[in-house]
Image (cartoon, rainbow, N blue to C red):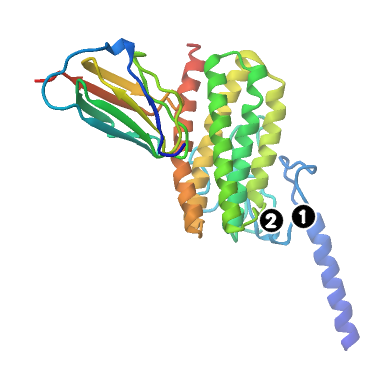
Amino acid sequence: MFRRRAVLSFLAVAALAAGCKLFKPVNPHAKPETRPAPEPEAAAVTAAPTSTPTSAPAAAPASAQPTSAPSPTVPPPVPAPTRQLERPTPQVSDINDAKIAAMVLASNNTDISYARLVPSRAERADIKEFARRMLTDHTGVNQMVTALLAQLDLTPEDNEASLDFRDESANKRDMMRELSGYTFDSTYIENEVSYHRKFLASIDNVMVPRARNRDLQTLLVNVRPAVAAHLAHAEQVRANVLSRK
Amino acid sequence: MRGAVLAVAVCAALGRGREHPGSDPQVRTIVIEQFTFAPAEVRVTIGDTVEWVNRDPFRHTTAADSAAWSSPEFGRGERFLMPTTQQGRFPYHCAAHPVMRGVLIVQGRQ
């Protein structure tokens, strides 16, 4: 009797393991060399849109790239456009201050990495000036976050959203590295608009409401107007670029 | 340096050495906070000094659209002082963040 149960259990586990392998999802935006081995909590992370918005309203829910095990409630993945500029922020479960800190740092580093492409590729003065400002302000935010983390003795904890920011920025940098002149200017500034929209949505819908530490929450509230001002500035520059002023 | 007076600027475009009889000149403060100038519109009397105080954790400037004045960037706790010497309506902005805007109105003394 006991033997029979043991055999049945073994078969069930083997079948489950095989099923997991068969249904292992593929994230086309993921870069194996930049994404560390999945942590145990990754199973609880989902990129599928839910009723709680975690991204800019303009983001198309259909572009979400599932990176966790599919469930019956998750619609089948829809292929994303290859030159998509805007993706929703993945929803992060079990969010905590360490994960929020990682998200802020990753999103700031993302924009810093875009700005570093500008001096050798852009032709417009307003694009170069905008990029210089992004470098200054986002570096400043990183310094504030780093100082606060030291004060709180908190270590940033990577998660689906912070890794998504890194993967996405790597893809976009690869694409923008090949461009120059007007094509670079228009692509860069369009990307800045979508980046700041996404960052703003993440601050409003995830970071500020979910931060538990009051100092971290205050920092996020202080950073928000900067991101909003950057977005408005980017929209202004984009309008000038499109009209070739 | 925190709390330091960054600069005292007398802009050539606003004129120099004018007489302004009447009450003593005042200092009017405009606070830079959350990426806004508050109050957004300020009326002063010629001869008054306008003081911009930065309370943001980001560096800002104050610059007239007409180029009548332009401050260097100043950080949190720093300030920029400017005596007014010419009447007029002066829309201004932050050169670092052009979406930040304000208006300075300089009136004559009665």
Which dot marks residue A197? none
- Residue A192 in percent (x, y) is at 55, 30
> Which is nearer the eye, B77 or A27?
B77
Count neighbours of disc 2 (C-alpha within 10 A) and say few if under 14, some if 14 to 19, many if 20 or more. Answer: some
- Residue B58 in percent (x, y) is at 47, 36
| Residue that badge 1 annotates | A23
The amino acid pointed to by label 1 is Phe
Relative placement, left or right, of A105 versus A178 is left
Q: Is residue A92 visible?
A: no
Q: Quadrant of residue A64?
A: top right
Q: Is A28 situated above or below B42?
A: below
**Quadrant of the drawing holding the N terminus of chain A:** bottom right
Give the tally of numbered discs: 2
| Residue that badge 2 annotates | A70
> Could you confirm whether marks 2 and 1 are on the same chain?
yes
Q: Residue at (86%, 72%) from the top-left corner? A: A11
